[in-house]
Image (tube, rainbow, N blue to C red):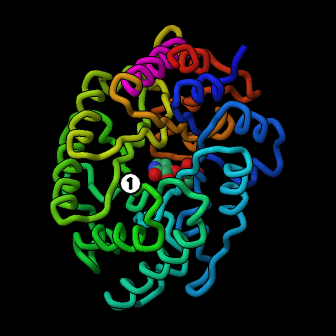
Amino acid sequence: EQTLREAATNRDFRIGAALAARALRSDPSYWKAARNEFNAVTPENALKMGPLRPSPHTYDFTDADAIVDFGRENDMYVRGHTLVWHNQKPEWFQAWDYTDDQLRKFLRDHIHTVVGRYRSSIDAWDVVNEAVADDGTLRETVWYDALGEEYLDLAFQWAREVNPEADLYYNDYGADAINEKSDAIYDLLERLLERDVPIDGVGLQFHALAGRPDPESVAENIRRFQDLGLDVQITEMDVANAVDDQPEDPLAEQADYYREIVEVCLETDCDTLVTWGVHDGSTWLRNFKDFSKRYTDDPLLFDDGYEPKPAYDAVKGAL
Ligand code: XIL
């Protein structure tokens, strides 16, 4: 019986998991599942600005290195997440009274240092994460407030400058199918391309509920971005059920939906799907208050005891 990793590799498909350094170090079952069942990894938090930048002039690469090394040693595709985001900024940032110019220089140094360090070990970067608000306008982040829309141009240019080999992605949630937000992202990326900004692809986070969004609309959405010349990857997938609307067999619904989305990937030549964690015991949904009331907390391919779930068989079967 082949593993999920083998099934994926045989089809030139990348099936990934978001990883935490602490679990890799302390939990042999987690380590084994990550290595045996996946051929791609994304550090779940370790490459974000907050964890990386304990103070304005220092970096702490310990956890990021551990995960990236794990990926490289085990012959996995490594996604870097993420360089520019409005969340998980360093704590000291709050009290920093910067000028726009200082912020620009800070971001440039950050991108140069981080992308440079992993020049030979990170294959793809989520350069900008979640720049578009749910209503389709550009989110008013510290980056936007200081630099305007150009912060995206700069971030992609700085990343490309240091590592011309890495593929550079714009990543967002709630834009998996055709909707107002993905329309806005489409327009944004079209503008970037018109300005010759070095962007290679778009990451669809895909934090989903079983059955939603409609797979056909997802396929149509993937195709329109591909028609712009962009690669499309599914970067943070998990599939929960709605707490107040539980189907009779939630695990079967979840499995069906995973299968449908993998089929959409294969149909559209979207060759990378990363799940946001290894097993249900490591899902972010258990700590994210916004979701935890409405979403079930078992959205991944392995259960709390690392047993493969119906969703695991569904994904493997579809590959
Ligand atoms: C989440 C992590 O999974 C959590 O551990 C952390 O506390 C908050 O961030 N969109 C993203 C990811 O782009 O970085 C987020 O990850 C989940 C939503």
Tell me residue 240's x, y (percent). Answer: 49, 28
Q: Secondary structure at mark 1?
A: strand
Which residue, given by chain and number where applicable, does mark 1 sit on? 169
Tell me residue 164's x, y (percent). Answer: 43, 65
Say if 132 sits above or below 55 in the image: above
Residue at 61 percent across and 26 percent down: it is 301
Residue at 50 percent across and 33 percent down: it is 238
Residue at 81 percent across and 51 percent down: it is 25
Left or right for 31, reference 180? right
Task: State whether label 1 is within 8 Å of ligand 1.
Answer: no
Q: Nearer the viewer, residue 57 or 94?
A: 57
Tell me residue 3's x, y (percent). Answer: 69, 23
Say if 293 sits above or below 128 in the image: above
Specify the quadrant that holds the N terminus.
top right
Say if 189 sits above or below 32 in the image: below
Residue at 55 percent across and 14 percent down: it is 317
- Quadrant of residue 299 in the image? top right
Q: Nearer the viewer, residue 202 or 141?
A: 202
Give the magenta range: 251-265
- What residue type is disc 1 on? Tyr
